[in-house]
Image (cartoon, rainbow, N blue to C red):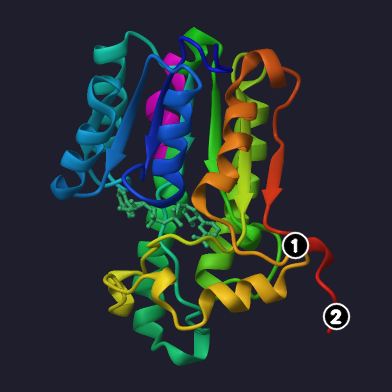
Amino acid sequence: MGWLDGYVALVTGGASGIGRAVVKRFIAEGCTGVGVMVRSAEQVDGLVAEFGDKVVVSVGDVRSPADNVAAVEATVARFGKLDTLVGNAGVWDFFARLEKMSTEQVAESFDEIFGVNVKGYVLAASAAAPHLRASGGSMIFTLSNSAFYAGGGGPLYVASKHAGVGLIKQLAYEFAPDVRVNGVAPGGTVTPLRGPASLGKQEKRLSEIPGFEDSVANAMPLKFIAQPEDHTGHYVLLASKANSRATTAAIIQSDGGWEIRPMR
Ligand SMILES: NC(=O)c1ccc[n+]([C@@H]2O[C@H](COP(=O)([O-])OP(=O)(O)OC[C@H]3O[C@@H](n4cnc5c(N)ncnc54)[C@H](O)[C@@H]3O)[C@@H](O)[C@H]2O)c1
């Protein structure tokens, strides 16, 4: 018996990192099936090999309205309903400072980073909304320590994750009482999170930054860098009607204690 017995979920950006760990945990918690939206065709086989007929994988770009609708429809067509949307696909900016970019680059990177991190979440919510209303389900969005604090990225990433806070609150307001809307805000985590193509960083991965793991671990009061699996229990809790039905517009911080970092 799991906390999500009989649930059907859709996870965007579910081929790697935190999203993939959520897919795995949701299936372990009893989900009938999980729709997974991935960026490229090469990401399909690994998911199917690991999870078989428990997943239906859709290739698409979260910035595309049609691709979001297709992912939702594929999930509902295969598994019959939708209980939980996990908006999770994201790109990071590798601390790109405003003055290190040309004004043209700022404009292009804004469109790319906000396109994936914010528009992607709004479009997924829009596409999933009728099915979540019908099931009395919920939405969960992956935010970041950068949704609350400076210093975890450059201005475009930090602003995009702050925007996620407003999105969660407004959607929670609009969808009550039918659909709960919550977030999980991880801190530094060992994943292949990539940068924006507009800054030439589409092949650069966060986990390849020299010293990244040690510097995150040392900065955090809990003194370790998270693995993707460390966050997944929060998604299970927020998805579970039996265990969090009174919770909406909440964001669970899963960041090793960023709030209580020492001054020195
Ligand atoms: N890794 C960290 O340190 C960290 C910290 C805080 C928050 N986050 C957030 O966690 C979420 C997941 O990232 P992750 O760290 O697991 O990295 P990840 O790169 O493993 O996962 C992100 C996924 O999003 C997909 N994606 C990117 N652009 C897309 C697009 N346009 N259309 C469809 N899919 C797209 C990628 O293919 C990838 O599978 C992101 O929202 C990220 O901002 C990560």
Q: From what the image shows, is residue 176 above or below residue 127?
A: above
Q: From what the image shows, is residue 188 above or below residue 165?
A: below
Q: Nearer the viewer, residue 50 or 256?
A: 50
- Name the residue carrying label 2: 263
Q: Where does residue 76 sit, x and y in percent of width and height?
A: 31, 15
- Main SS of the magenta segment? helix
- Left or right, 53 with reference to 174: left
Mark drawn on residue 222: 1
- Please check the rendered image and state whether residue 127 is part of the magenta-colored stretch, yes or no: yes
Callout 1, which amino acid? Answer: Leu
Residue 247 image-quadrant placement: top right
Please tell me whether mark 2 sits on a helix, a strand or a loop.
loop
Please tell me whether mark 1 sits on a helix, a strand or a loop.
loop
Q: Could you tell me which residue is drawn at 51 percent across and 70 percent down?
A: 156
Question: In the picture, which quadrant includes the C terminus?
Answer: bottom right
- Please check the rendered image and state whether residue 200 is part of the magenta-colored stretch, yes or no: no
Q: Nearer the viewer, residue 81 or 20?
A: 20
